[in-house]
Amino acid sequence: MIKKVHEIVPEVAEAVRGGAGSVSAHKLLDLYPGRAIKSVGVVRLEPGASIGAHSHEGDEDFYYCLSGCGVVIDNGEEQPFTPGTLQITRSGETQALRNTGETELVFFAALIATIDE
């Protein structure tokens, strides 16, 4: 299977998880039945936009910054979110993200089901 981000119409949402502003997501893979990978995509936050604080249960979320700058709140602790930064939220943990820059904040996101061992 080959997917090209520029060929996917983005989904646009406002105030995601209680955050502010517009968030657009080019979902490359979404809810693939019977697989650990739940969702994969490229997400864009406009300047000043945010994804509100939320927790994950039964899955893990991975955010990898591609461009722009922001702040990620990882279990209540603020950290810079700049190109090359990977933020991981494990099952039972919390995260939030906001764009603090003057350009779009672009990141790769993957939501993976937690596997019981």
Image (tube, rainbow, N blue to C red):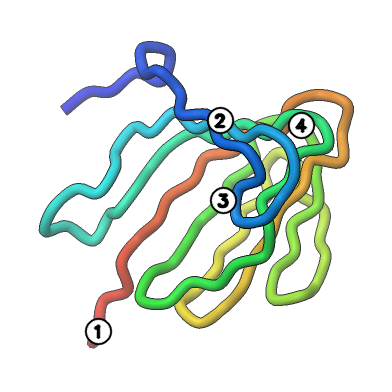
Q: Identify the residue position indicated by label 2 in the image.
A: 24
Give how far across and how far down residue 11 sits, in percent. Answer: 46, 29
Which callout, 1 or 3, points at the residue further toward the start of the chain? 3
Q: Could you tell me the amino acid type at mark 4?
A: Gly
Residue drawn at the location 82% of the way across and 53% of the way down: 80
- The tag earlier along the polypeptide, 2 or 1, is 2
Measure the C-alpha gap from mark 3 to mark 4. 13 Å
Q: Which residue carries the number 3 mark?
A: 63
Q: Position of residue 115 (x, y in %)?
A: 26, 76
Work out whether residue 103 or residue 49 is closer to the camera in this orientation and state it: 49
Badge 2 amino acid: Ser
Residue at the image position 52 percent from the left and 40 percent from the top: 108
In the foreground, 11 or 116:
11
Mark 2 → mark 3, Cα distance in angstroms = 14 Å
Residue 20, given in percent of the width and then of the height, sits at 75, 44
In the displayed structure image, the side of residue 68 where residue 16 appears, left or right: left
| Amino acid type, callout 1 | Asp
Tell me the CA gap for discs 2 and 1. 32 Å
Residue 114, compared with residue 64, is above or below; it is below
> What residue did someone put label 4 on?
68
Q: Secondary structure at mark 2?
A: strand
Q: What residue did someone put label 1 on? A: 116
Screen quadrant of the C terminus: bottom left
